[in-house]
Every structure is written in structure tokens, then in C-alpha cells.
Image: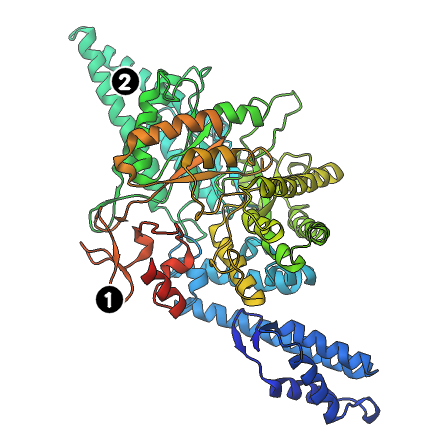
Amino acid sequence: MKVIKRDGQTVNFDRAKIINAISKANAEVDDEEKVTEEKIEQIVEDIEARKRKRILVEDIQDIIEHDLMEDGKYILAKTYIIYRYTRELVRKANTTDDSILSLIKNSNKDVMEENSNKNATVASTQRDLIAGEVSKDLTRRVLLPEKISKAHDEGAIHFHDADYFLQPIFNCCLINIGDMLDNGTVMNGKLIESPKSFQVACTVTTQIIASVASSQYGGQSVDMIHLGKYLRKSYEKYNKRFHEDFGDKLDEETIAAMVEERLYDELKSGVQTIQYQINTLMTTNGQSPFVTLFLHLDKDDEYIEENARIIMEILRQRLEGIKNEAGVYVTPAFPKLVYVLDECNCLKGGKYDYITELAVQCSAKRMYPDYISAKKMRENYEGNVFSPMGCRSFLSPWKDSEGNYKWEGRFNQGVVSLNLPQIGILTKGDEEAFWKLLDERLDLCYEALMCRHNALMGITSDVSPIHWQYGAIARLKKGEKIDKYLMGGYSSISLGYIGLYEVTKLIKGVSHTDPEGKEFAMKVMKRLRGACDQWKADTGIGFALYGTPAESLCYRFARIDKERFGTIEDVTDKGYYTNSYHVDVRERIDAFSKFRFEAEFQPISSGGCISYVEIPNMRHNIEAMQEVVRFIYDNIQYAEFNTKSDYCHVCGFDGEIKVNDDNEWECPQCGNKDHSKMNVTRRTCGYLGENFWNVGKTKEIKSRVLHL
């Protein structure tokens, strides 16, 4: 029998440890409360008689307490519980100490590999990570109800971002960049006035991004449509100056050419400022800002021509890439790009189709941009088109006192995610039991989400002036509470979910792409959405159903469940759960069918939804990608491409990357073995997850990689 410890480690069952623990409690009670050695032996045999392949250490302790009380030894049971609690405190203290020390020694792999924009070996970043470990410890032991902490540890739910829960900060937002640029802002006690040129507007934008990132833990989005007016200001400045200086010396055509040359230089430099600043800045969180640029052409925008040029230049520079330390052009992780397809640019003869053609080339080489269909989004959000937040979550429609829709200047309070497959495992295919346990788990999620909400209630604008006093979210007075922005649906708070495919397999025995499975999956989604809607009606808080894009959580839930319940075919045997409502990567399905199927789930998961497809050798399939983009516009709200071509980000090698004799991925051109700096083809089953990368660590992983 294997025992699963609290830290997830699996060890052999050791009866001596149980005998020792009961004996220590036995020694502390009066003689009449003691149990005999025979009784202790009987308790151990009771545990062994369960004949479970795996058992949680908490379950062992529960059996001991039950047997003692059943024998009438209540005081002894209480003494044992106290002993157990004391050991728990010691364990938690030691765990926190160990996790912090392992960070300093660069051996805490889970934390070090969690964020792509954090270099965990750098001292400044380690300060933030150390603070995060302390926050997680206090969150689990003090700030959260014990049942929430226990549910998180057991993988029933995931309480996201516990490393920041100690602080009164929120998840992600849509920066009100238009207001901050037009009306000025304040940073570090210094007034930043409205820019007079495009270059300055770009510089101020990056300063705002860095300041905002330092006072929240999630992503942020910036709508680039607000920069069009500043490009026109630069044009007007150069046009006026050159006419004044050369109007009586040069003809109009020559002056226009000079203006255009100078304007393009500023356009190029401004966009380069945004790209390089974001990739070189380090926030007080010890990371690059997690930022998304929203690229949208609005037919009613008076600066649409300027914004078309800005988007074109952003895509051109992203296609080129950024030089790494070796001088090789590579794909930067940030800013993420989200490109909107509308009537004017959906590759159906629109005026701005040429920009979309560049966007597709950029996707083929650099993985970005993602694509939003304005057509489908208007259907789902009352005729509106707006950016997802940096974490890919969406807000619900909200109107101000004058009846105008408002998107920018709003935010997400936080996320709690639900492990759907675990409910299916526990109910063993009993659908009636499944719905009952699902409702119980939803109640647990609600309580956890309210912990997040209540932690923000009552805080004042002083905790983050850039957000609350100087325009990123609001312009409150010093000392003014933020409570009104937490209520009435102004901000969202999100219920995430993992593993719709797996839970459908567990309850119905088929994939959710099967008609019978789809009917069940839709019922599950509607139950989740119904819970969010009911909570919102009951409280006035903006609960939202969020298709969680936290890929690492797919592995965490699967790992916990495999340790608890063993290997279950097509569920825990894969090493991952399928994200949200997505089709499992191993199913044979074409891009159009996948998007068409998943599009039906996106309106239900309106608090966050994205779908993706694999396109093999994307750089050689531009026409095929363009066809998919046209399909996206007509059929699905939010989608992206993933590449199937090998690529080394260190040297730019664009061939096949293979496993070497030491069972490590190695670039044949430069010898790079760092998996975070390469793309590797998803061979055979399409799986490219955490274990796929960690080659050579265990026999299981090693054999899998060799097979692939």
C-alpha cells in the first residue's frame, strides 16, 4: 500500500509510524482512557484490511480517530487530534521554510517554472517569490477557512494566486488608457501631462503599463485605438513645421514626402519603444509586464487610417522579432497581440485585408496574434467589441449612469477553478450522484470566491494610486474606498473549470464530441453558468464563467488525481486534463470542425473563452491559414493558432529538433537544450505538456519521450 503525503509525495505504508503516533497520545491520558497494545494493533490491521493501492495520510488519521471514538476512548481521540494538529503546524512551518530555502538554492522547480516572464534565479525576482511563499503559507493556515485550504490541497478546487492573496490587490484589468493619455496621470508623485506626439504617447503608455503591472498580479490589456490621434498630432506638427520652413523653397509633393518620411520614422520608433520597453522593463514583481495589445479597426473611428498604420507597424515588428543576447531574432513573450477581424479586414475583399494578410504571416512565424471575430462578439455581448483582459478573461456588459457601455477601466477580482474530472471519479459513473456532488463543489467555489471578494472590500484608493486615483481604473480621492467598483457587475470574479472532456468520459463513457456526450457536457456547462448567474443575482457581484487558460492547472489536477485514485484510462493516464471545454488533443478532428464544435460553448463561457487549432508547418501553409481566419470571422468569437514546426529561439534553427543520447531535446545547430527556448513538434498524440518537457526525470517520462 502506498501512502500519499500532504506534499504530494508517495511513500510505502509504514505501520510503525501509526503505532508510534497512537502510543504517544496514549501515554498522555489517564489509565482508564488508554487503549491496549492489542487495540492499537487492531487499528493498524483495520487500515491494512482496506487493501487500497493508494491512501491519503489524512484518510489514515480519520480512520484512527473513528476507531478510537467507536471504542469509547473520546479523550484519547481528542489527544490524538491535538497531536495531529500540532504535527500539522510543524509540518506547515517546515514546508514553508523548505520552499523558501529551495528558492534561494534554485531547486524549487514548481515555482521557478511557473511563469514565463519571471527569471527565478535573479535576486530581485526571488524577493517577490519569497514573499509569495509566505503569502501562500498564511493564506492556507490563517486567511482561508480550513475546508477551502483542504479542498485546494486535495485538488477539488484551485485557489489561484494564493502567493498574492495576502495583499489587497486584484487579478487583471483593461487599462483606461484613453483617459490617462488625454487627461494626464501621476506616477511616483510626478504629473504626466497629455502627450503632444506619437513617440511621447508610446513612452507614456509603457510607463503606465509598468506602473500598473507592479500593483496587480494578473495581466493587463491596452486598446491601441487611442494612439491614432497622437500619430495625427505628429503628422500635423511635421506638416506645419516643414511648410513654415520650406513652403517657399520646395513644391508640395516634396514637402509631403519629407513629412511622410519623418512621420514613419516616428511611427517605427514609437512602436519599437513599446515592444522593447515591455520586454526590458522589470516590474516590482520581478517580471516583465504581462500585457496584451488590442488591435481593432473601428469603422466609426475618425483616426482609422492612423490606427491602420499603427497596427501594420506592430505586426511588422512582431514578425521581425527581437534580438536575443546572441544577436538572433527571436519571438518575444510579450506583449501578447489580439487582432480583431471585422467586415473591413476579414479577407473577403475589405479595404484593410492587407493588414490581416500580414497578421497571418506573423501568426505563422511568431504564434501571435490571436483572433477575435467582431461579428460573433457582437452577438454575444450586446453589440459590443472589446478586449479580453491580459489573462484572456472577458467582462460582462455594464452601463454607466448615462446608459453608455463601459469596458476600459474595469477589472477582475480573482479566480477559483473547479476540478470536474475529480467529481466524475468520486461518483464512479453515477450521474445522479455526480450532479449532487457538483452542487456541493460549486457551493465550495462560491465560498472561496467570496473570500477573494471580501479581501478587497473596504480597502482604500491609497493601496494603488495608479489604479484608483490616477485613472487606470478610477480617479478616486485619497482615502476613498473602492467598494463601489466591486459591486453591481462593474468588475468580474471568475469561476474557472478544467476537464469537461474527461468528466464526460467518466460519466457517459464517450467524448463530449459524441452526441450523447455533448448533451451531458452542455448540461454541465449550463449548470456552471447557472450557478454564476444565480450568485450574481443574489449578491450583485459580477460572477463569470471562465474557460481557464491556466495550462499548468491541467497538469496539477491530473497529477493529484492520479496519486489519489491511480491510473484511469483516458483520464489520469495522460498526465494532463483537457483545458475547459476544449476537444482533447488526441481526437482526430480538423480545424474547421474543432472551431465549429467549440464555438457552441463560448457563449456559455462568456467570462473567458479561447479555442485553438494546430496547423502543421504553418510558414508553408499561409493560404490554408487565411482560409481558417475567414472561418474564424464567421463562426467563432476567439481563436488562435499553435504551430507544429520545430524552432530554436536561440539560433533560429527551423528544422527537426530531436532527442539526443541523454534523452534531452537538443538543437542540432547550436546545441540548445533549454526547452523554454524552443518549439518542438507535437508528434503522434499531440501532447506537449509539463511532463513532455521534463525528459529523463523518471522512467515513465523517459519511455514516453522515446516512444514519441
Identify the residue at horizontal 45%, vertical 61% (top origin).
111
Q: Quadrant of residue 54?
A: bottom right
Q: Quadrant of residue 239?
A: top left
Mark 2, mark 1: which one is toward the viewer? 1
**Dot 2, crowdedness within 10 Å: few (<14), some or many (≥20)?**
some
> What amino acid type should be assigned to the residue bearing mark 1?
Asp
Q: Nearer the viewer, residue 594 or 262?
A: 594
Q: Quadrant of residue 661?
A: bottom left
Residue 118 horizontal/vertical position (percent): 40, 54
Identify the residue at horizontal 56%, vertical 53% (top origin).
160
Residue 256 horizontal/vertical position (percent): 23, 12
Residue 345 to residue 101: above or below: above
Residue 194 to residue 212: above or below: above
**Cα distance in 3D space between marks 2 and 1:** 61 Å
Q: Nearer the viewer, residue 255 or 165?
A: 165
Identify the residue at horizontal 32%, vertical 56% (top origin).
675
Residue placed under numbered mark 1 in the picture: 661
Residue 627 horizontal/vertical position (percent): 36, 27
How many numbered dots are placed on residues in this image? 2
